[in-house]
Image: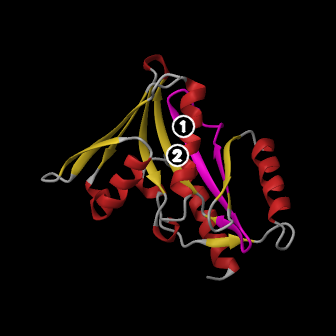
């Protein structure tokens, strides 16, 4: 894909995102992964500092930073300009590699009911060639930091038919992070739940 095509795809996605709600299926266009160049060639340390500064300067909030087994730097940050912040949390997963900054970002959408100390995982969008690279586990660590900060005592989520083609991987992922999974194989649906233990 040429730079001009990438720029056009990015502009189209931004326009559509501004017209529709972030959870509307039309926003979830499958764009190919590409890499924006680093500010300084092969300088991951500088790029991480630059991106953290950029996140802070745009009014968002860095939640978690980690390095995966591929020596990629992963930043999970919360989008704070959403008018529905009291009920919804939108996390973005930024991956910085020696090849550049991975675009588009992966996303996690959470619903919260602060008065009930509950959180619901609405959508965990780490797909395609991003699977099995540790991004999901790093995003889950960010979620657990938010759980502590918001004093959440219960996290729930749903497994739908869309997830059924990789159900073993999904169950393994959630079990690894302390969730219980209840599946209805006949209907190809399920529920996940994690009760936070008090410290």
Mark 1 falls on what kind of element?
helix
Residue found 63% across the figure and 42% down from its top: 79
Instruction: Tally the numbered discs.
Output: 2
Residues at marks 1 and 2, CA–CA distance in whole angstroms: 6 Å
- Please rate how many residues cluster around mark 2, counting C-alpha atoms within 10 Å: few if below 14, some from 14 to 19, many from 20: some
- For this orientation, the residue located farthest to the front is 199
Instruction: Give the left or right position of residue 86, taking residue 73 as reference.
Output: left
Residue bearing the label numbered 2: 140
Residue found 15% across the figure and 51% down from its top: 187
Is 37 or 62 nearer to us in this picture? 62
Residue bearing the label numbered 1: 144
Instruction: Give the left or right position of residue 17, taking residue 188 as reference.
Output: right
The percent position of residue 21, horizontal first and vertical second, equals 49, 45
Task: Tell whether position 101 is magenta.
Answer: yes
Residue found 37% across the figure and 47% down from its top: 175
Task: Tell whether position 32 is magenta.
Answer: no
Q: Is residue 11 above or below residue 113?
A: below
Most frequent secondary structure within the magenta stretch: strand
The percent position of residue 131, horizontal first and vertical second, equals 48, 65
- Please rate how many residues cluster around mark 1, counting C-alpha atoms within 10 Å: few if below 14, some from 14 to 19, many from 20: some
Instruction: For the residues labelled 1 and 2, say whether their Cβ atoms are less than 8 Å apart.
Output: yes
Mark 2 falls on what kind of element?
helix
Quadrant location of the N terminus in the rendered image: bottom right
Q: Is residue 16 visible?
A: no
Question: Magenta part of the protein: which range?
Answer: 74-102
């Amino acid at each position: 894909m040429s730079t001009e095509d990438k720029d056009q795809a990015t502009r189209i996605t931004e326009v559509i995102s501004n017209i529709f709600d972030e959870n509307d299926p039309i926003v979830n266009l499958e764009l190919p992964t590409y890499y924006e160049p680093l500010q300084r060639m092969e300088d991951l340390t500088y790029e991480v500092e630059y991106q953290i500064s950029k996140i802070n300067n745009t009014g968002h909030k860095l939640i978690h930073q980690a390095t995966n087994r591929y020596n990629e730097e992963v930043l999970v940050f919360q989008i704070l300009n959403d008018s529905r912040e009291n009920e919804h949390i939108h996390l973005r997963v930024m991956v910085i590699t020696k090849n550049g900054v991975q675009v588009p970002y992966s996303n996690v959408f959470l619903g919260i009911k602060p008065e009930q100390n509950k959180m619901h995982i609405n959508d965990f969008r780490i797909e395609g060639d991003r699977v099995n690279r540790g991004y999901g586990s790093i995003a889950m660590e960010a979620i657990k930091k938010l759980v502590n900060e918001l004093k959440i005592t219960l996290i729930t989520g749903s497994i739908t038919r869309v997830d059924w083609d990789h159900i073993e991987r999904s169950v393994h992922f959630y079990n690894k992070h302390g969730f219980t999974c209840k599946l209805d194989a006949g209907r190809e649906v399920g529920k996940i739940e994690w009760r936070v233990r008090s410290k």
